[in-house]
Image: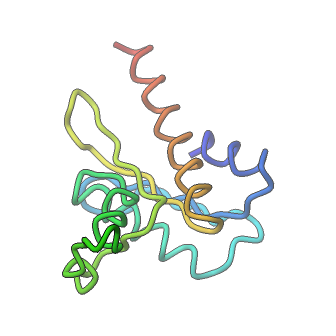
Amino acid sequence: MSAGEIEAEKNGWKVTIAITDTSAPIMVKRCNGAFPASYNVAVEKARTAVQFQKKTGDLEKSANVSDGNSRTALLSAPYVLMRGGVPIFINNLCVGAVGVSGVAPDQDEQVANAAVDALNQLMKSKL
């Protein structure tokens, strides 16, 4: 969580960061100034990333029309298909995810990646 907060703060971004295990949010922080709806969006990005075991940005790409192709059926599913959700893998097993909401999609994902990267570094040092 703190690595994501640091990434957001150094860029002046007001975000909400949600960390989930495979079933429910375990930590959520709405940073000062983050808009209220960012809480739900961050939680749902994390939930979507862990359930699909994919970055939500990849899911967004599959739903958006590109070169006349898309998977618009995903739009009716109860998931948040916007960048900013990043799964957490340990030993090739998806154990959770980080979801971020509050700024542009690539910035949300940048904050989520910072949090996941910090966790991965911590796990490497423990193994």
- Tell me if 113 is positioned left or right of 78 in this view: right
Q: Residue at x 29, y 37 (%)?
A: 89
Return the residue nearer the eye: 77 or 119.
77
Q: Residue drawn 36% across and 70% down?
A: 81
Please determine whether, in this image, residue 28 is positioned above or below residue 121: below
Count of numbered tags: 0
Comparing 79 with 121, the one in front is 79
Task: Estimate the x, y position of residue 90 in percent, counting from the top left.
Answer: 28, 31
Q: Residue at x 35, y 73 (%)?
A: 64
Q: Classify residue 65 by image quadrant.
A: bottom left
Position in image of residue 109 (x %, y %):
52, 53
Q: Position of residue 97 (x, y in %)?
A: 37, 51
Q: Residue at x 72, y 64 (%)?
A: 14
Q: Position of residue 75 (x, y in %)?
A: 28, 82
Position of the C terminus, as image quadrant, is: top left
In the displayed image of the protein, which residue is found farthest to the bottom? 76
Scheme of image coloration:
rainbow
Residue 110's place in the image compared with 41, above or below, is: above
The one nearer the camera, 58 or 65, is: 65
The answer to which quarter of the image holds residue 67 is bottom left
